Every structure is written in C-alpha cells, then in structure tokens.
Image (cartoon, helix red, strand yellow):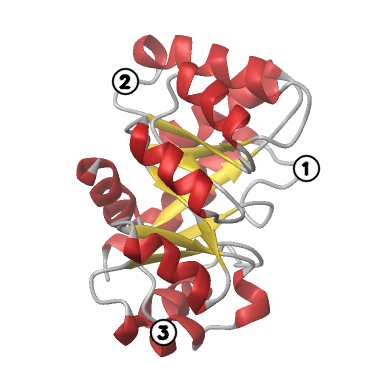
Amino acid sequence: MSEILQKIKDQKIVPLFYNESFEVSKNIVKALYEAGIRVIEYTNRGQQALGNFTRLKEISRKEFPGLLLGIGTVKNIKEMDDYAHAKADFIITPVISEALVKHALERNILLIPGCFTPTDINIAYQNGLNMVKIFPADALGKKYIKSVQPVFPGMNFMPTGGIHAEFEDIMEWLNGGAVAAGLGSSLIGKDFNEEELTQKTQNLLQQLNQN
C-alpha cells in the first residue's frame, strides 16, 4: 500500500476521468501511459464504469505494464466491493464515513477518502489512513492544507476539483502542502486529442520533475 502512495507522491499528479466508451477509455489510458503516467483514477460516474474498469484491468498487465489503476467516485460499500473484486489498485471516495473506512481496512483495500472538514480528516487520521483527497479543493482554496496540516502530522493531502492542468497552478497547491493533485477535465477535456493529451501530460511531468 505504501508503495502505491509513494508512486502517487512521485508522480505529483493523478489524472482522473470517465468515458462511457471502452475504446475511448482505453485510448485515454494509452495516451497518458505513453506520456509517462503510471497512476490513473478511473471514475465511477456512469453505467458503463464497472464494465469498462474491469476490462481495463484485464488488459493493463499486458498492454500497460506497471500501471496502477484505481477507481474514484465510490460512495458505498457495495461499490467498494464491486471494484475490489475487479482488482482496483486503490479506491477513492468523494466522502468519508466510519463504515467505509472500517470496511476498507477489513478487506485490506487501499482507501483514499474524500475529505472537506477537519472532522472528515480526523476520521481518516484516527483509523491510520495515510492519504486523503481534499474535495472539492477549489471551494477550500490553496491555503487550506497548510492550515490543517499541523493538526495531522504525517497525513498526505491530495486536492482534487477545480485544479488547472498547468504547471504554475499545480505548484501553488504543492507548495501549499499537497503531495499530489488530482486532474480531471482540465487535463482530459471532452474534445481531447490523444497526441495532444500525451504531449501536454509529458510536458507537465517534465516541468514537475524539475522542481
């Protein structure tokens, strides 16, 4: 588990997306993989999500070796079990509850819960979780993490929601105490082009690795 968290921290960004088409989903994963991305969050935001995710996991060992593919927008225990069965490398939620956390711990699932308040973060902290998603990050602002960080020593924060896929914006979050940033539609827009996505992501990774 700590290896996955370390890879997220090393990568500094976690691309996240959903597309109802399996072929489009696969092409997005391919474009990101070719850019050097090795941790991706697929999001549980449509009827095809579980089926697409299952197929992506089935092909990833052969076609995308070394890729860690997690699932996001998981909101209840049934969804958690479905994606654990589909061999998700990690599970990200938009919310947190004692029930979700305890179920994840019992099943040895790497959970990165969505937190908004210090009370939310404390549930994760008291249960020994090492990383939380701050969501929606843009509603809280870039000073939030530094403000709560001293209360939760050792906790890793990954803001997601409203973060621009631009070096300067991401660095502001990282300098504000984040270990990585979740990037959705600002990186993978509806009218994305695979070559452009690879190039944009590659440039971003290079800039971040130089800092």
Q: Is residue 36 visible?
A: no
Residue picked out by circle 2: 65
- Image: 171 above or below 204: below
- What is the three-letter code of the residue carrying label 1? Lys
Q: Position of residue 36 (x, y in %)?
A: 36, 39
Q: Residue at x 56, y 48 (%)?
A: 93
Image quadrant for the C terminus? bottom left
Which numbered disc, 2 or 3, marks the residue that appears first in the sequence? 2
Query: Which mark lies nearer to you, 3 or 1?
Result: 3
Q: Residues within 10 Å of mark 1 (few under 14, many from 20)?
A: few
Q: Position of residue 136 (x, y in %)?
A: 64, 67
Which numbered disc, 1 or 2, marks the residue that appears first in the sequence? 2
Q: Residues within 10 Å of mark 3 (few under 14, many from 20)?
A: some
Disc 2 to disc 3, how far (Cα)?
Answer: 37 Å
Q: Residue at x 77, y 31 (%)?
A: 46
Residue 152 placement: quadrant: bottom left
Q: In terms of secondary structure, where does tag 3 sit?
A: helix
- What is the three-letter code of the residue carrying label 2? Pro
Whether the residues at callouts 3 and 1 have beta carbons within 8 Å, the answer is: no
Residue picked out by circle 1: 190
Q: Which mark is residue 148?
A: 3
Q: Is residue 32 visible?
A: yes
Q: Residue at x 71, y 41 (%)?
A: 192
